[in-house]
Amino acid sequence: MIPTSFDYVAPTSVDEALSVLAEAGDDAKVLAGGQSLLPILRMRLNAPEKVVDLGRIEALRGVRDGGDHIAIGAMTPYCDIVDDALVREHALLLAKAVETVADPQIRHRGTVGGALVHADPAGDVGAPVLALEATLVVVGPGGERTVAASEFFQDLFETSVGDGELLTEIRIPKHTGWGASYEKFVRVSHQWSIVAVAATVRLDGGSIAEARIGLTNMGSTPLRATAVEQALVGKGASDLAEACSAAAEGTNPPSDLNGDADYRRHLAGVLARRAVQKAMEG
Amino acid sequence: MTAVDDRPALEVGKDRRRKEDARLITGRTRWTDNMVLPGMLHLAMVRSPFAHANIQNIDTAAAQGAPGVVGVFTGKDLADTQGVNINAWPITADQKTPTHLPVCIERVACAGEIVAVVVARSAAQARDAAELVDVDYEELPAVLDMKEAMKDEVLAHPDLGTNKSAFWRLDSAEQGSGGDVEEAIAKARESGIVIEREYRQQRLVPAFMEPRSTVVDPTGDQMVVWSATQVPHILRFAIAATMGIQESKIRVVAPDVGGGFGGKLQTTPEEFATIAVARKLGKPCKYTETRSESMVSAHHGRDQWQKLTLSAEKDGTVTGLKVELLADLGAYVAIVGGGVPVLGAWMFNAIYKFPAYQFNCQTVLTNKTWVDAYRGAGRPEATYGIERLMDELAAEVGVDPIAIREKNWITKDEFPFTTVAGMTYDSGNYEAATEKALELFGYDELRAEQKRRREAGDPVQLGLGVSTFTEMCGLAPSRVLGSLSYGAGGWESASIRMLATGTVEVVSGATPHGQGHETAWSQIVADRLGIPFENVEVLHGDTQTSPKGLDTYGSRSLVVGGEAIVRAADKVIEKARPIAAHMLEASVDDIEFNAGQFTVRGTDKGVGITDIALATFAAHDLPDGVEPSIDADATFDPVNFSFPHGTHLCAMEVDTETGATTMRKYVCVDDIGTIINPLIVEGQMHGGLVQGIAQALWEGAEYDEQGTLVSGSFVDYTLPTAADTISYVSEHTTSPSTTNTLGTKGVGEAGTIASTPAVVNAIVDAVRHLGINDIQMPCTPERVWKAIQSAGGTQDAAPVADAQPHFDEGTPNQDPAAGTTDGAAQ
Ligand SMILES: Cc1cc2nc3c(=O)[nH]c(=O)nc-3n(C[C@H](O)[C@H](O)[C@H](O)COP(=O)(O)OP(=O)(O)OC[C@H]3O[C@@H](n4cnc5c(N)ncnc54)[C@H](O)[C@@H]3O)c2cc1C
């Protein structure tokens, strides 16, 4: 369908973008890869007067080494993440999750920042970012602030990024040498997750020293299964089922055409076990 | 001797790359939406969000005043000029057929119906203004479930007084083609086996790639209508018949059309509305739907409940089959919507020798999108029912599903065979196709693997599914259609024009929308006339260039339209023969034609057919009384349907922990008679298979209690992509059809018809040992998992089949996971 008409601006710096946003107030919408925003505009679910395209702000793109963390620019497209050496070395879980997003065209346009701010609970970036205990950098008229991933996701399609603010960077503490796996359950390949489990583990000998588990589409935001993480400590590969069976505890997953809440809870347990098993393999 | 060696290699049978693909694939071609005319205006439709409502008032003032708007028209404004959507196949004389207006005037009967048309200078302006049309609806109770509709408590069309549209029956005892089915069933209850099942054929969205689009130019002497349609000829007829426009004043063009799958064999409200508005304004107008509009307003397919009773002797010899269908038509009886389920009447008995048979079909109206043909149209539904039942019978008898089929199918020596439904199958060889398929599949090894996995309690179980299908296609003998009150004949027409410079135009009344007619027709003509493939041009889809035709659907183009071309070509040769004799100064009786050359028997004198075309063009020296043309027309009316068949084998893995299903292997061996172009056939098979597999696994049009299509976009209507498919093994056996000279049978729908039951049979086979004998389509992981849970999920649970009640004891028997309403088992 055809969106309503809007003004289009493409600033080349974050400061410029912020001042355009400040001026436009409520009537502006930020455009990243457009893979969520454009369908929304075309279906006329939103009708901004101004669209502020971040695509020309070079500073927001790319992955760099931040010492104890890696820093990913909000405008880095999925396809750049998947093969990025720093990401694969220090945050393998993110690469594994991003590989499963949609199809190559969408991974070429869609950005990590856009996905995080869009905050679709069925999106595949939230759970790994949460599990990897990332910090998100948000700038606004009042300057820069950092938000822990655990504080970032507030509700369905709601984050702590306010009107007039921009997400600029995702900082992920280095998980060097951690094995990772993202078990995404879908019916057709280009689908959003019905349920997915993000698991990353550090091994000590043959057993788990530390584990981080994130859940996709098990509630209105990405979730972390901390009880499972704790229960996994010290476990070997053949000894995961019981710890993982609690993956869905305390979750409130949706019911839709792909499955009801009970089914999703069941899936979470099975997928958690499989994810951890694969993560242990590398 | 040498003449044979000089012959060019035959075109028929060559895997020619398709002539049309470069332009179709790049899109640099004449899709309707690519069309731009001077001064052209754009339409946007205002559609009802409600399933059933009275239109109280429509305020168009704001829209009228919006930028670029030329006019806003409600149903009232168009009442006298908009025509009406036609039902061309009333299945009974007393069928209830609600009037189907293109733009509703008083009441909408399903969500997505048009209530106003906005016309503006640009498509964007039209869309903006459409948002400003203020429609005041009074919501009415809607009936959405076809079983509820049967109660006539809530009416889809209150003025009709009932939701029941028509009841149609075929009974083998009554028509004298077999015995009494009730007797057969009663006897089996005493001393044989009775299998009773209720299956659901879910609603599907045809989901063609190119959205529908119509451009109308009313400014010339003839009004020209370009439309993304499968049926330009039928559209022209419908416009003339319902809009008060002389047929000779209408030219309809189907330019390149991007897929249809039956979804574009409709004459649509959008076409009629665009014509009405263009004529009113005297300006060219274009309407192109969005995908969201297409999902809800283009017709849907399938949507049946099937109550099936099969009787057999203890050894598995079938004795009777009783079919009771309930078919949801949606809100209106579409062009052939009522007839689609009835096509199953001749197909439920399939390849088996049932001595007694009865088919009952009740069509019913609801407040959902109208339903009509979707790839296979009536035959996939029937094939699903019978092929599922044959697997159930095999399980009951305790034999392999292949063995139960062998016991009951028509053997190769029995052709031509007149079935219990009264059809005469001309040719076939089920033994050969099955043998080849089993071998390619590695059936025995896979069975052994299945056993191993069962014994090991593997969480991933393996199941093998069989579908030995046949179908009737190549619609159709006009007489048969007449006897069924079908609104048209089933002939097809062709013309061949021999151009002076040696090239040939072939005009076909069949209208391709992706099938590759241009290539296949060129191959046929190249061989027949001895002309290079490249020198044949195929014209179609325009009532000005191909004035006669009945278009493309029901796998009819080749078996009917192809035969018309052969006959036209033969006429060309016959017309050229006396001219050749004259040029060669020989007697007509001594003239032979071979590979483009007319020769005098016993000499080396000859003249090419293209030389004759040139001589005819000049017409300087023709024999007396011979007209200066060797062009020819032919119209072919088939004497019978065509009956392709095949054996499809599918191996599915079922992850019992999650219910996820994965296809391991798919082998099909189809007998489609003579193959013109193996590459095109391969394409038809693969595409057809995916669509059939998609019904089994992925697709389903689901509504909520308000009558809103929940799966109204490709986010929720899970159409597969190439990434979801495996490499299929598609091979052939050949029993040429005896009802056309090429020996061809239809292939356009075969894959879709055959594959659905093969997949579901495989899934059920994988978990049958857990006590499961059915899973409702689409077999989502959730449904599979829940079936396993409710069956107890243990290896030694008792089969539940025996525990199910008989139909006559009241409650229908159906699988525990299947609800009575759509999506109840979701
Ligand atoms: C067919 C299809 C299939 C898909 N399948 C999947 C899938 O399987 N898994 C999955 O995870 N996702 C899927 N997606 C969604 C995809 O991942 C989107 O790309 C992503 O959600 C949004 O990223 P974007 O860069 O395109 O953002 P946009 O669409 O441009 O923006 C999204 C939202 O974020 C805001 N925004 C963007 N960047 C910033 C910023 N830096 N600061 C503040 N606000 C910002 C925008 O204003 C907008 O509200 C799919 C999308 C499509 C079209």
Image (cartoon, grey):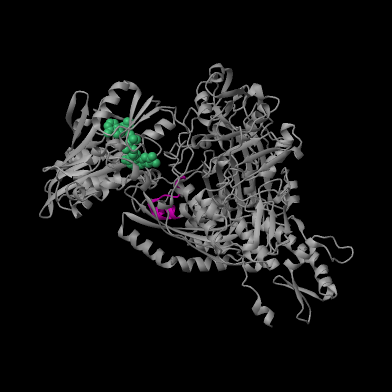
Image location (x, y in percent) of residue B590: 82, 76
Residue A152 in which image quadrant? top left
Image location (x, y in percent) of residue A54: 30, 34
Total number of numbered discs in the rendering: 0
Q: Which of B568 and B821 is in front in this view?
A: B568
Q: Along the horizontal axis of the image, is B533 left or right of B289?
A: right
Residue furthest right as drawn: B624
Q: Quadrant of the N terminus of chain B?
A: bottom right
**Residue B196, placed above or below residue B705:** below
Q: Along the horizontal axis of the image, is B440 left or right of B492?
A: left
Residue B645 in which image quadrant? bottom right
**Residue B741, placed above or below residue B635:** below
Image location (x, y in percent) of residue A159: 26, 29
User: Who's the residue at 65% across and 56% down the image?
Assistant: B538
Q: Can I make out residue A263 in this image?
A: no
Q: In which quarter of the image is ligand 1?
A: top left
Residue B360 in which image quadrant? top right
Q: Nearer the viewer, residue A243 or B451?
A: A243
Residue B545 on the magenta segment: no
Q: What stretch is highlighted in magenta?
A: B762-778
User: Who's the residue at 31% across and 54% down the image?
Assistant: B459
**Residue B346, placed above or below residue A142:** below
Q: Quadrant of the C terminus of chain B?
A: top left
Q: Along the horizontal axis of the image, is B219 left or right of B303?
A: right
Image location (x, y in percent) of residue B646: 56, 61
Q: Which of A274 and B248 is in front in this view?
A: B248
